[in-house]
Image: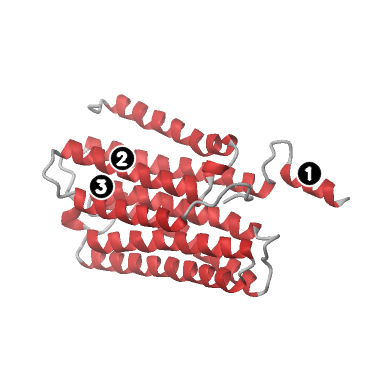
Amino acid sequence: MSQSAVSNHDYGRLGIESRKLGMWVFLASEVMFFTGLIGAYIVLRQAQPDWPDPSTVLNIPLTALNTFILICSSATLVKGFYSAKDGDTEGMQVGLFLTVLLGALFLSIQAYEYQELLHEGFTPSVSIFGSCFFTLTGFHGCHVLVGVICMFVVFIKSMRGKYNPQENRGIEIAGLYWHFVDLVWIILFTILYLI
Amino acid sequence: MSTETHARPNFVYIFLALFVLTMIEVFCVNFPWGKKYIILALIFLAVMKAALVAMFYMHLRYEKILLTVIALAPLIFSVVLVFMIGYDLGLPW
């Protein structure tokens, strides 16, 4: 098979690279998953007249810091991706390493938050708000964990010289997932913690 | 993120915009407005932030329109689902 045939197969008739299209279709299923959960939360909340004010139960400043950390991780990933495109190997590796580090920090703070809440008696079984809170943040946390593992693999590959200005699709595909996790948290932070 | 055939947006500005919008969100909760207006403001800010991430960090703005359709299609179905369940439960909306 010639190089051009391989290239045509990669892009297909839609003109979108197949791995990227695959990731976007997967992300579409993830959108359905999270909007289903958020939709259930909205319906349950509307049906419950004595819903507690989240700021009386949850640590808003700590979670605002965590949101900032996740936003920073998206920025460092973009920095790493464009460094790879520019042939700046060191910039790429630093960007990817910081992304993994910030993702792990996000999970650590979330684990600390869980520990504090459980210690204060706010458990998943204490109320419908507790169930919704732990379900939504728990599923999101699992996604972040998968994202951290993926980004760590991408970082290791970058250390082994797998990415260069011509071949950096791996960073891009993993990056789409990471940015999506960031995007979901932006919505969850508003809906669960602030409203 | 896409194969580059366009000028790169300034990602520092996007990052700063996300940071500022998050700060506004946190302080917006204590504004002396009615609860309905605060909720509308918070939803507007969250959608703005999500759109910034999708358009610039995920490069949807520079991709083919098909990818945007793929990303938004399940959202439309979900909104319909939530409203229909709410209607079925007799919720006041």
Pair 3/1: label in front = 1
- Residue A173 spot, x, y in % from top left: 60, 54
- Where disc 1 sits, the SS reads helix
Tell me residue A12's x, y (percent).
74, 40
Alpha-carbon distance for marks 2 and 3? Answer: 26 Å
Look at label 2 and name its amino acid.
Phe
Q: What residue does disc 1 label?
A: A8
Question: Camera-side residue: A117 or A26?
Answer: A26
- Please state which of the two labelled residues, at mark 2 or mark 3, is closer to the viewer: 2
Indicate whether B56 appears above or below B64. below
- The amino acid on which the numbered mark 1 sits, given as a three-letter code, is Asn
Do the dots labelled 2 and 3 sit on one chain? no
Q: How far apart are the alpha carbons under marks 3 and 1?
A: 52 Å
| Sequence-earlier tag: 3 or 1 | 1
Q: Is residue A171 above or below residue B1?
A: below
Tell me if I can see residue A117 in this picture: yes
- Asked if residue A59 can be seen in this view, the reply is no
Marks 3,1: beta carbons within 8 A: no
Residue at the far front in the pictured view: B7
SS category of the residue bearing label 2: helix
Q: Are marks 2 and 1 on the same chain?
A: no
Task: Specify the label residue A91 is tagged with.
Answer: none
Q: CA distance from mark 2 to mark 1?
A: 41 Å
| Residue A114 sits above or below residue B42 on the image | below
Q: Amino acid at mark 3?
A: Ile
Pinpoint residue A192: horizontal percent, then vertical percent.
Answer: 28, 49
Residue on which the image places disc 2: B44
Do the dots labelled 3 and 1 sit on one chain? Answer: yes
Q: For mark 3, what is the residue?
A: A128
Quadrant of the frame with the C terminus of chain A: top left
- Visual colour scheme: secondary structure
Q: Which residue is found at the position 59% from the left and 47% from the top? A: B6
